Amino acid sequence: MELKQPKKLAKAVFLLLTFFAINLLTAQNQRTVSGTVHDENSVPLPGATILVSGTTIGTTSDFDGNFTLQVPIDAKQLEISYIGYLKATVAITNNKIVINLKQDASKLEEVVVVGYGTQKKSDVTGSVSKVEMEKALAIPTSNVAEMLRGQAAGVQITLGSARPGGTSNILIRGRNSIRGGNSPLIVLDGFPIEDINDVAPDDIASIEVLKDASAQAIYGARASNGVILITTKRGKEGKMTVSFNSYTTTQELTKNFELFKGEDFVNLRREARRSINPIVNGVQEFSPDDVNFTGVEFDNFTAGKFTDWEDLVLKSGTIYSQTVSVSGGDENTKVFSSVNYFRQLGLIPTADYVRGTFRLNIEQKINKKLKFGANINISTDKQRKESSNLDFITISPLASPRDEDGNLISRVAGANASSSTQNPLFNIQESDNATKINFYNLNVVGDYQITKNLSYKVNTLFTRRLTDVGTFLSSLHPAGITPNGSATVSNTLREEYLIENILNYNGQITDNHRFDVTFVQSINQRNTSRTTSTGTGFGSDILGFDGISNALNFKTTRDEEQFRISSFLGRLRYTMLDRYLVTLTVRKDGASVFSDSNKWGVFPAASVAWQAHKESFLRNVKSINELKARLSWGEVGNQSLDPFTTLGVVGNFPFIFGGAIVGGNLPGTVLPNPDLTWETSTTFNTGLDFGLFNNRISGSADYYHTNTTDLLTDITLGGTSGFSSTITNGGKTINKGVEVVLTGQIIRNKNFDWSITTTFTNNSNEIVKTGLVDINGKPVDDRSRNRFVGKPINVIRTLVFDGIFQTDEEALASAQGTLGGTVTPFQNVSTLTAGSIRLKDVNGDGVINDDDNIVIGTDPKWYGAVSTNLRYKNFELLADLYIVEDATKFNPFLASFNEGGTLQSVRNSIKVDFWTPENPSKTHPRPNFNSAPANISTMGVADASFVRLRTLTLGYNLPKSLLESMKLSSFKFYVTGSNLFTITSFKSFSPENLPNEFPDTRSYTFGLNVSL
């Protein structure tokens, strides 16, 4: 045994010496080549690929376009390539090499991803927007939707939830459907996915948005609301590179309102008391009768002790993100792989979100004709939500969260059945709400070049998503006391399969006539199974929802559903004289949610484009680099129905049989309709793309008009039918808008670049048919579902606030009809006094009733962004200003209290200038302890327009000299401020959410990007 150690040591020494010898011989047979890659204007091109001709030896240029490369002693030439530029071959010399790449037909040769392939931007005939990833990735978030905000005209992003792991809503060109969804189709690497957040932001290489029917039609029924195409990063030919991206973010609360606190709240309570008991002398020193304080509230009041509930519940938040990626390959094999860890700690201590992702993209060339690719994506999400909403804003600041011993109490002072008096800190402690998602995605692609012009491609996809949700209320929680603890656990498994066969022929009749034809056959199936368990009566709270099987009352239900869609499509793209472009598409989709007679839908589309700048009469006009007119028409479908809707479903109905309760079933409450068919949207689009003065000014403008017919609508049925409602294809909407994008390259030279981009979107929609008609067949309103003919899809229906009664006589005269003959059944006449709100008799009939409600659209009239990108030497500055104009939102905290909400249940609210005898306000009524003196009116309808500095990023790239000494390809550190300021009149934490929803934040990020 002892003799073996010297032998092993000798072998190690021999191998080590051999290694150094080989390196020495290799070094003697190599030399160092350096150079710089510029464009035609001497602007550095970072990331250009430099390869030794005929080998896989290569590198990439740094931020300043510089490169250094060890090459064989006998190497003669270098090949330099960069996306959007012509490849260059240069001779290797002993001097520093300077390469000036020429643009490949200028900006127009930029490649964009379209359905089932890519296309030169100059050849695109539809409306397609390409997102600038540098700007999008400047947002520190796990929410990919938020990266798109303001980055593409026609794409509207609204905040869904600001809690950790929350999502945002995406609308492309507004709303078309009344009942069905309006969310776009998300396509990742050619395959549809359920959630845009299934991909880690750092893995994304490009994002394109298909907006008009001609661009969407290739995806048929699933594309009625637009398509977002996401392409992940791929390995590149050249040396293996390792990249590391890390950032830390601190989040803080923002708001533009104040609550009644301290003496302000005392005055509020005093005036509410005085409004029902004018005898109380509000001028003398406060007394219990004067302000109606009892118990703990009175003790705190006399001691001058106030509780800041906002400070107790809301803290600061933190985000951590680290990504490591490896990329590289040779002529035959290319690999990209990444690992990401993301964690967000919310403003409420229990709000937490953790995500880990792994991605592996492989491309393997088998021979000259055959190649394969595989993408693997695995992610695990864990989200713990706060188990209390933000109703703390209605709690009295004189209430205490803890008893005399310092223990949290379940209900605060003045406790009653209202949830507003529950102690939010206690609820957080005595409840749990957790979600875990395990996601697996595998897609395999095979590509075979049958002939020079004909190719066959097969796409296969398998995804598996397991979602576990558990909620628990302890036996001490106010809502868990009676059942002695309650829990719900649901497990949802969704598996999806897709197979596509794609045949493509790329041909050329002559130099002036090019075309390509694509045929696709596709089948997509999604299986969902769901198990839900509920339990009450727990012997112990220790296990939480994990102990649900031990509950005294335990029940489990299970349901399954299956959805399948089969498709056939064909597309022809034709180019004549490199100026006249035509695209024709037809797709046939069959969906399992429809009956056999209506299962299939056919959706055609056509588009043409004219590249006017290539005509002889404009070819020599140097100021015009691009001038392309586009025109398109097309149809797409929507099948947003739950499975089995056309067949009908049954519900559980236990009954007594033989003296015992047995399980049974009865038909559901919705009458099945086997005649349901596809919603169909027909869109006309015209657009113009332009580039002027060497593309210093460029942009696009589009106008679109969409008619959506056969809309799925709910119809209420009479009780004698045995059903509550049914679904028909009786609706119709119109949706139209204008989109403008303008980019200016203000400064463009070697050391200084400055560009500004603006986007503008105007959109409006209108309901033409609700599904209801009168006896003459004329479309009428469906008030029960808030749908109105001639009005937008999203609306508020409310009475009109018409000021404040300033005297008792004025209020009484109005109630008796002596002022304008007004009778007010919506107001309690006996409580109308000075300080009550006045409602407007809109139709002038002398009676205020349901007919005096008005309908107000809530969606913005227009939205847009102004972004700027400035580079000076190694410094970068990016800024995004996001604008939403003429948006409307109902704020209940300006209605339920300030229109007379009872202070017996709503104890606090947003601080406003309310009416008192000494302060005759004309904007907000007098506080009141009794029942509300008025219904909801436009006082609670607020302007939700805003201007927000969404992002401000300052970055610095280390110079080449330092990079070489550190053996690095790139090193960048940056600081980013998000939501630094917001200009809005909407009273909330954010104009996109209500005061009792999880608040949006201002954040500060410090990040680092390093590549080896």
Image (cartoon, rainbow, N blue to C red):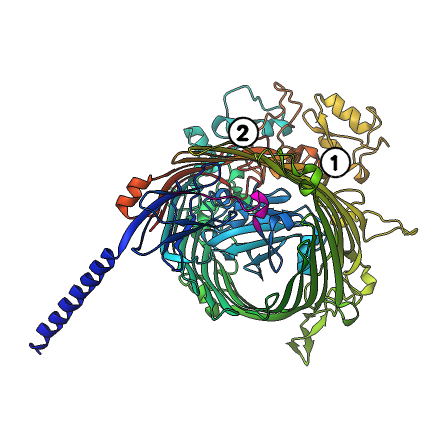
Residue 536 placement, left or right of 699: left
Q: Which residues are magenta?
A: 98-111
x 31%, y 56%: residue: 74
Compared to residue 191, the image places residue 579 above or below, namely above
Q: Nearer the viewer, residue 213 or 802?
A: 213
**Quadrant assignment, res 151:** top right
Q: Which residue is mark 2?
A: 291
**Structural distance between the alpha carbons of marks 2 and 1:** 32 Å
> Can residue 896 be seen?
no
x 80%, y 31%: residue: 841
Q: Nearer the viewer, residue 162 or 423?
A: 162
Q: Residue furthest right?
A: 776
x 51%, y 27%: residue: 264
Counting other residues with Cα less than 10 Å from the Cα at mark 1, is it few (<14), some (14-19), or many (20 or more)? many
Mark 2 or 1, which is nearer the eye?
A: 1
Q: Residue furthest bottom?
A: 658
Numbered disc 1: secondary structure? loop
Q: Nearer the viewer, residue 343 or 42?
A: 42
Residue 684 placement, left or right of 332: right
Q: Is 969 inside the magenta-drawn segment?
A: no
Classify the position of the N terminus by image quarter: bottom left
Q: Quick one: label 2 or label 1, which is nearer the N terminus?
A: 2
Percent coordinates x, y for residue 871 in the rendering: 44, 34
The residue type indicated by label 2 comes to Val
> Can residue 601 be seen?
yes
**Quadrant assignment, res 517:** bottom right
Counting other residues with Cα less than 10 Å from the Cα at mark 2, is it few (<14), some (14-19), or many (20 or more)? many
Percent coordinates x, y for residue 571 in the rendering: 69, 61
Q: Is 102 inside the magenta-drawn segment?
A: yes
Q: Nearer the viewer, residue 457 or 486?
A: 457
The residue type indicated by label 1 comes to Leu
Q: Which residue is mark 1?
A: 799
